[in-house]
Amino acid sequence: MKLYDSTMAPNPRRVRIFMAEKGVTCDNVQIDIIKGENLSEEFLAVNPRGFLPTLVLDDGTVIDETVAICRYIEETHPEPPLMGTDPVSKAQIEARQRHMEFDGLLGAMDAFRNSFPGFASRGLGGNVGTIDAIPALSERGKTMVLKYYETLNDHLAGSKFVAGDAFSVADITALCTIDFATAAARVPIPDACEDLKRWHGEVSARPSAQA
């Protein structure tokens, strides 16, 4: 397998952590998003959408979209389970995973992409042509992230992990969202979010978090 990756982006990191939790390795090809290498003819021949991560299997099959790649890894390497073990847990983890994306990651990406000078004419990711950034969306994104922190903190007051008692793909998405939001979008976790900070410290200490 070959993973087209970018160390500065949150979505490829989600796959790296997922694979590390599973003990799965593969060839890694770094693509510089800032320089626009994801829009080069070479990469677009692999994934015409221009998005990372992209996984290419040994038979040439191309899988893009973060959760789809994780699903493939989960099905081929079921232990330890990161996407549920029965119909209820699978549905609950899937729901929480989507909450982390829609409630947090999208806001963090808006906050970064619409304020970073290098993306002034690349307001949307992927192979969509020239689209100007909108500074107001950056401020809205930061507001969304702060609300996300508060909501997740309240949830973690009564739960060890994002989707229950076991570490899952939902925790991976939440970790990558928060690390990206704090470092790239510059939205730190408020001091009042003590349970969120407790959880963040614990999951950040996992060896896979260094992937």
Image (spheres, grey):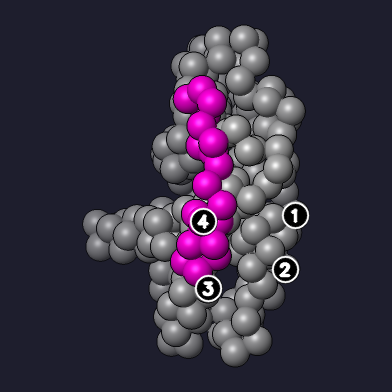
For the residues marked 1 and 3, what is the alpha-carbon distance in whole angstroms? 25 Å
**Residue 15 x, y percent position in the rendering:** 58, 43
Q: Residue 164, how many percent across, how many down?
A: 41, 73
Q: Amino acid at mark 2?
A: Ala
Tell me the residue that label 1 is attached to.
210
Of badges 3 and 4, nearer the viewer stands 4
* Residue at mark 4: 136
Q: Amino acid at mark 3?
A: Leu
Q: Is residue 169 left or right of residue 14?
A: left
Marking on residue 146: 3
Along the polypeptide, which appears first: circle 4 or circle 1?
4
Is residue 122 positioned above or below 179 on the image?
above
* Region in magenta: 123-144
Picture quarter containing residue 100? bottom left
Counting the numbered discs, the total is 4
Residue 99 magenta-highlighted: no
Q: Earlier in the sequence, mark 1 or mark 3?
A: 3
Q: Quadrant of the N terminus?
A: top right
Q: Is residue 138 magenta?
A: yes
Q: CA distance from mark 3 to mark 2?
A: 23 Å
Relative to 15, residue 112 above or below: below
Q: Element under label 2?
A: loop
